[in-house]
Image (tube, rainbow, N blue to C red):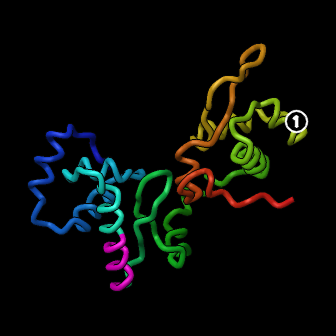
């Protein structure tokens, strides 16, 4: 289920319907219903919160929510990822969740795909020829697979003859790897 876009007028009237509920509870409902990260600005719009301190108000409410989750021993937390907020299961429950997700084993990346994805993540935007020069092998099929899995996107075209495509990581890449932004990638070792 996805949080459907609503106009600002609809957002404020919807917010009034739930105004008797605590802000953290209303945020929880939105994060629970969404299948992708929701930005603080969007949460503010949906909740009818406006003003200069929208982001601070949302963050404070999410901190309260996470505090409640921790006190009650819940298995999940609201986490900032890919520029927004989303609910995630705690790592301690990974073995249990893995049992549920065994049907998705084919989602694993091959070694060539991981290598290609790493090069793109650290060198983006990057041309296919540059990736192939670093890896030393052709990577057309691997790139196609990464595009199909939405881990990589076309980030533009190079200002070179033939205007080759430039590749970069997608917001879905950030979500899959639990990163708030591309600058959160671990530093490369020499």
Q: At 57% from the left edge and 41% from the top edge, which residue is drawn?
A: 150
On whether residue 170 falls in the magenta region, the answer is: no
Q: How many numbered discs, if any?
A: 1
Tell which residue pokes out farthest to the front in this image.
52
Foreground of the two, 143 or 186: 186
Badge 1 local density, few (<14 within 10 Å), some, or many (20+)? Answer: few
SS label for mark 1: helix
Q: Please tell me whether residue 165 is drawn above or below residue 119 in the rendered image.
A: above
Most frequent secondary structure within the magenta stretch: helix
Q: Which residue lies under the disc numbered 1?
A: 133
Q: Please tell me whether residue 131 is drawn above or below residue 122 in the rendered image.
A: above
Foreground of the two, 65 or 53: 53
Image position, residue 87 (x, y; %): 40, 63
> In what quadrant of the picture does the C terminus appear?
bottom right
Image position, residue 143 (x, y; %): 71, 36
Q: Please tell me whether residue 172 is drawn above or below residue 81 in the rendered image.
A: above
Q: At 56% from the left edge and 63% from the top edge, which residue is drawn?
A: 102
On whether residue 71 falls in the magenta region, the answer is: yes
Q: At 77% from the left edge and 31% from the top edge, which residue is drawn?
A: 128
Q: Quadrant of residue 152?
A: top right
**Magenta segment boundaries in residue numbering:** 63-72
Image position, residue 120 (x, y; %): 72, 42
In the picture, measured across the screen, residue 3 lies left or right of residue 116, that is left
In the picture, measured across the screen, residue 17 lies left or right of residue 65, that is left
Q: Quadrant of residue 162?
A: top right
Q: At 59% from the left edge and 57% from the top edge, which residue is drawn?
A: 177
Tell which residue pokes out farthest to the right in this image.
136
Image position, residue 100 (x, y; %): 49, 66
Q: Please tell me whether residue 52 is drawn above or below residue 166 in the rendered image.
A: below
């Amino acid at each position: 289920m996805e949080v459907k876009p609503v106009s600002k007028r609809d957002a404020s009237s919807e917010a009034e319907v739930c105004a008797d509920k605590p802000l953290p509870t209303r945020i929880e409902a939105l994060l629970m219903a969404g299948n992708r990260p929701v930005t603080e600005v969007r949460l503010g719009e949906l909740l009818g919160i406006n003003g200069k301190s929208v982001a601070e108000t949302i963050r404070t409410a999410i901190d309260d929510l996470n505090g409640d989750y921790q006190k009650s021993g819940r298995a999940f937390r609201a986490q900032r990822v890919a520029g927004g907020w989303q609910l995630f299961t705690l790592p301690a429950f990974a073995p249990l969740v893995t049992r549920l997700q065994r049907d998705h084993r084919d989602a694993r990346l091959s070694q060539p795909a991981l290598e290609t994805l790493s090069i793109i993540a650290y060198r983006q935007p990057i041309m296919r020829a540059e990736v192939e020069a670093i890896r030393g092998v052709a990577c057309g099929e691997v790139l196609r697979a990464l595009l199909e899995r939405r881990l990589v996107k076309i980030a533009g075209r190079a200002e070179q003859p033939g205007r080759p495509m430039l590749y970069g990581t997608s917001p879905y890449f950030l979500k899959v790897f639990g990163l708030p932004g591309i600058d959160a990638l671990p530093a490369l070792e020499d």
